[in-house]
Amino acid sequence: MTYWTQKLPKYLRIGPYGLAATAIITLSVLFRTILVVFHFPEINSDEGKMGIEAMHIAFQGQHPIYIYDQPYLGVLEAYIAAPIFRLFGVSDITLRMGMIILFALFMITMYWLASLLYSKRLALVTLVLLSFATTDMLIQQLRAVGGAVELIFFGALGLDSGNRALGAYPGPAVCAVQRAVDSRFLLSRVAFTCHPLFATGFA
């Protein structure tokens, strides 16, 4: 409890780098939101299956684990979209709101990771570079077909949590390494249900 009492004010305090990061992330998320509102990219059958699963979760009380006919991709996007469907109705826009949320979380995690490993200045440069994307990259980031954005988000989160576990707590090095391994193991169990590539990424 004492540890968090000491660390919480530090996490809540936002300096100039934090404000700059917030602005960059906000603009990049706003840009992708505008694209979604204008129905970019066009919806396809794979995205339709994710929408059907989200409707089954939201309105029929079902709890699927994998995409229909694709028992190797998880349905995290459907679980995120389900409450949005309940609140705002069913559409391609509400389905893709989950993708925007995951992308925002990815950007935040990358800022934390780059700040931890390098510097806050380089973390801002990283955010600027990640804000830009080609058309193909935007399609992967915005189309709810399972696995794409989760792959980069959980990958960055695994690296960040592992590195923070190594240095966050005082004590023997063996204990710190064990905490890092435990955090990555727990995260990998969730990530693996989204995409089989996590089996190698967290090994």
Image: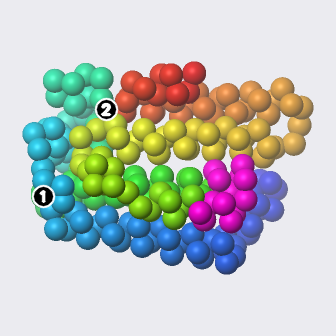
Q: Dot 2 corresponds to which residue?
A: 74
Query: Residue 138 location in percent, x, y?
Result: 30, 54
- Residue beneath the point at 66% across and 72% down: 17
Mark pair 1, 2: CA separation: 21 Å
Question: Compared with residue 1, is residue 6 higher up or lower down, i.e. above or below?
Answer: below
Query: Residue 58 location in percent, x, y?
Result: 19, 48
Q: Is residue 85 left or right of residue 198?
A: left
Question: Compared with residue 49, is residue 71 higher up or lower down, i.e. above or below?
Answer: above
User: Which is more N-terminal, label 2 or label 1?
Assistant: 2
Which mark identifies residue 41?
Answer: none
Say how many tags the image has: 2
Mark 2: which secondary structure?
Answer: strand
The overriding secondary structure of the stretch rendered in magenta is helix
Mark 1: which secondary structure?
Answer: loop
Identity of the amino acid at label 2?
Gly
Please say whether residue 131 is one of the residues in the magenta stretch.
no
Instruction: Give the extent of the magenta segment.
Output: 113-125
Query: Residue 19 location in percent, x, y?
Result: 60, 76
Observer-nearest of 41 and 6: 41
Query: Residue 5 location in percent, x, y?
Result: 77, 62
Question: Compared with residue 96, is residue 25 higher up or lower down, i.e. above or below?
Answer: below
Q: Furthest-front residue in view?
A: 134
Residue 167's quadrant in the figure? Answer: top right
Q: Are marks 1 and 2 in contact (CB under 8 Å)?
A: no
Q: The C terminus lies in which quarter of the figure? A: top right
Q: Is residue 61 visible?
A: no
Identity of the amino acid at label 1?
Ser
Residue 72's quadrant in the figure? Answer: top left
Q: Is residue 152 visible?
A: yes
Q: Dot 1 corresponds to which residue?
A: 91
